[in-house]
Image (cartoon, rainbow, N blue to C red):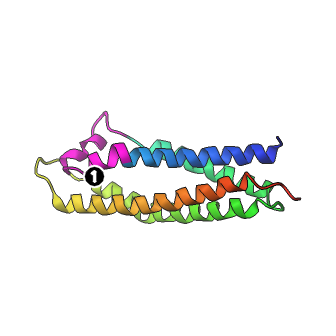
């Protein structure tokens, strides 16, 4: 196993970490958070609030760096497109994340506490979940493409 393969595997692991965390949030966090807002959003408020931002602030840059290293090491190989397509998909999804998903989520979870369910916030949360699942679908498909590259022989 050479450094190209090691970085390729590390990229796959890092990308799968993102997928795993996203799936976890979609199963364990978002349905509960958006169930009876704004009261159900208290999990993001106070001294003991869930704070996912530090995790994402670490894992995204690491994954991008690994992608770029892996792409540069495999630029002249048959694996290039199997790295490039997921990387471009990931970058596009990150743009959508920072343009829509993060601002909308911050807006929703920052709502002041009340015991009255706000159906407008529920609807916004439902739309956010639906669009986020679509985003996750693109990322999962691109992960399959990335993994397919591991099956290609280096023809440099």
Left or right of 88? Residue 116 is left
Of residues 41 and 13, the one nearer the viewer is: 13
Residue at the (46%, 61%) spot, across then down: 135
Give the magenta range: 27-50
Q: Is 33 contained in the magenta span?
A: yes
Residue at the (47%, 57%) spot, across then down: 136
Query: Residue 151 placed where, x, y %?
Result: 74, 52
Is 123 above or below relative to 51?
A: below
Q: Quadrant of the C terminus?
A: bottom right
Residue at the (76%, 59%) spot, across then down: 79
Residue at the (48%, 60%) spot, across then down: 137
Left or right of 61? Residue 30 is left
Query: Residue 12 placed where, x, y %?
Result: 64, 48
Disc 1 residue crowd, few under 14, some 14–19, many 20+, Cα 10 Å:
some
Residue 98 visible to an observer of this rendering? no
| Residue at the outermost front position | 151
Is 82 above or below relative to 2?
A: below
Q: In which quarter of the image is residue 43?
A: top left
Residue linked to disc 1: 110
Left or right of 145? Residue 95 is left
Q: Quadrant of residue 91?
A: bottom right
Query: Residue 52 placed where, x, y %?
Result: 42, 43
């Amino acid at each position: 196993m050479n450094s190209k393969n090691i970085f390729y595997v590390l990229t796959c692991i890092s990308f799968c970490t993102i997928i795993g965390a996203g799936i976890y949030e979609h199963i364990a966090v978002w349905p509960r958070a958006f169930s009876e807002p704004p009261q159900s959003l208290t999990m993001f408020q106070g001294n003991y609030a869930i704070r996912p931002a530090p995790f994402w602030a670490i894992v995204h840059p690491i994954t991008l760096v690994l992608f770029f290293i892996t792409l540069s090491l495999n630029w002249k190989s048959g694996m290039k497109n199997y790295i490039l397509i997921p990387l471009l998909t990931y970058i596009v999804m990150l743009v959508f994340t920072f343009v829509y998903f993060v601002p909308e989520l911050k807006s929703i979870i920052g709502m002041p506490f009340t015991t009255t369910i706000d159906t407008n916030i529920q609807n916004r949360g439902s739309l956010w979940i639906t669009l986020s699942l679509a985003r996750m679908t693109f990322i999962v498909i691109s992960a399959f493409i990335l993994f397919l590259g591991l099956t290609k022989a280096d023809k440099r």
